[in-house]
Amino acid sequence: MPTGGQPLSGTTQNTRTRTTTSPTQRLAPTSIRQVPQTAIQRQIDAELAQAETPAAIAAAQRSTVAAPAVSTAYPSVPTADRGDPGTYAVAFTTELLDTNFAVQSRGALLAWAEHEEAPNTLPGVPASVAGKALVLSLADPDLPGGSPSPVPSAAQWVADAEAGVSQSVADVQAEVDPDWTQIISQGWQPRDPLMTIETVTGTMTVATNGVAAAPPESFSLTVTLGSAAYARAGYGAVAVADWTLH
């Protein structure tokens, strides 16, 4: 998974209001483990490390991310949703995508995303950029190793706000990504025992001034998960990738 987030291979209109965000504190990592250095472990470690190109690492090191914060518009994913990867992936994706552009801000979204992050502990990812992967995968998809993002650019967010655009998702479901299942079945183990990749699907309805412009469209994305850095326990998000809307 390149540092920017590339993987191994409508509901009720949002009415949340903007408020001053509350900063959060990063917790010391507690779940990183030593894994047996079997032949398959060394082989896949080397393959994953090779995917982390110098250009992607250098771009991430030069980039800055928002300070972690939550708000009324973007609250922390509930503790009750952090114990299961599929449940967390659905809750995270729903909050990420349900947006009223005139009421919510892109900056608050990215601060919330940093609050929800889990460090990228895959081979080849330096500690200096491990905590940036989620926000960069959302905010800077054009970085080396990046992937299409569901978060509009700053300019597009402003345009959508001025036009009265909102979007909401429904029928959100998650399942383990087949590529992740394959490398785990080969005997490889991640250093973070909570690390996994979920494929999330659902439908999105886009409205203008509360009126749906078209029938719901299907969406999909992948979200890599790991041990949350700022929540007290459970899952957080490492990176988002492979966004499609059709």
Image: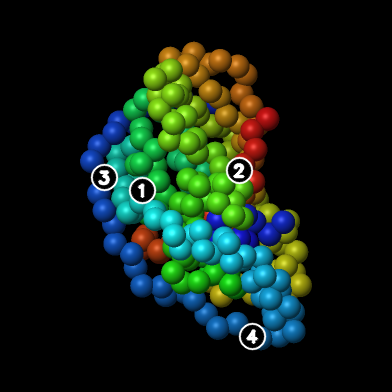
The residue wearing badge 4 is 36
Q: Hey, what amino acid is under mark 3?
A: Thr
Numbered label attached to residue 111:
1
Nearer to us in this view, 124 or 235: 124
Count of labels shown? 4
Nearer mark to the viewer, of 1 and 4: 1
Q: Hey, what amino acid is under mark 4?
A: Pro
Q: Can you give x and y, in whole percent of width and height, for residue 155 in the image?
A: 44, 31
In space, the residues marked 3 and 2 are separated at their CA atoms by 27 Å
In space, the residues marked 1 and 3 are separated at their CA atoms by 9 Å
Tags 1 and 4 touching, CB below 8 Å: no
Q: Hey, what amino acid is under mark 2?
A: Pro
The residue wearing badge 2 is 148
First reached walking from the N terminus: tag 1 or tag 3: 3
Tags 1 and 2 touching, CB below 8 Å: no
Nearer to us in this view, 106 or 199: 106
The residue wearing badge 3 is 21
- x 56%, y 75%: residue: 191
Tags 1 and 3 touching, CB below 8 Å: yes
Tags 4 and 3 touching, CB below 8 Å: no
Asked which secondary structure carries label 3, the reply is loop
Nearer mark to the viewer, of 4 and 2: 2
In space, the residues marked 1 and 2 are separated at their CA atoms by 20 Å
First reached walking from the N terminus: tag 3 or tag 2: 3
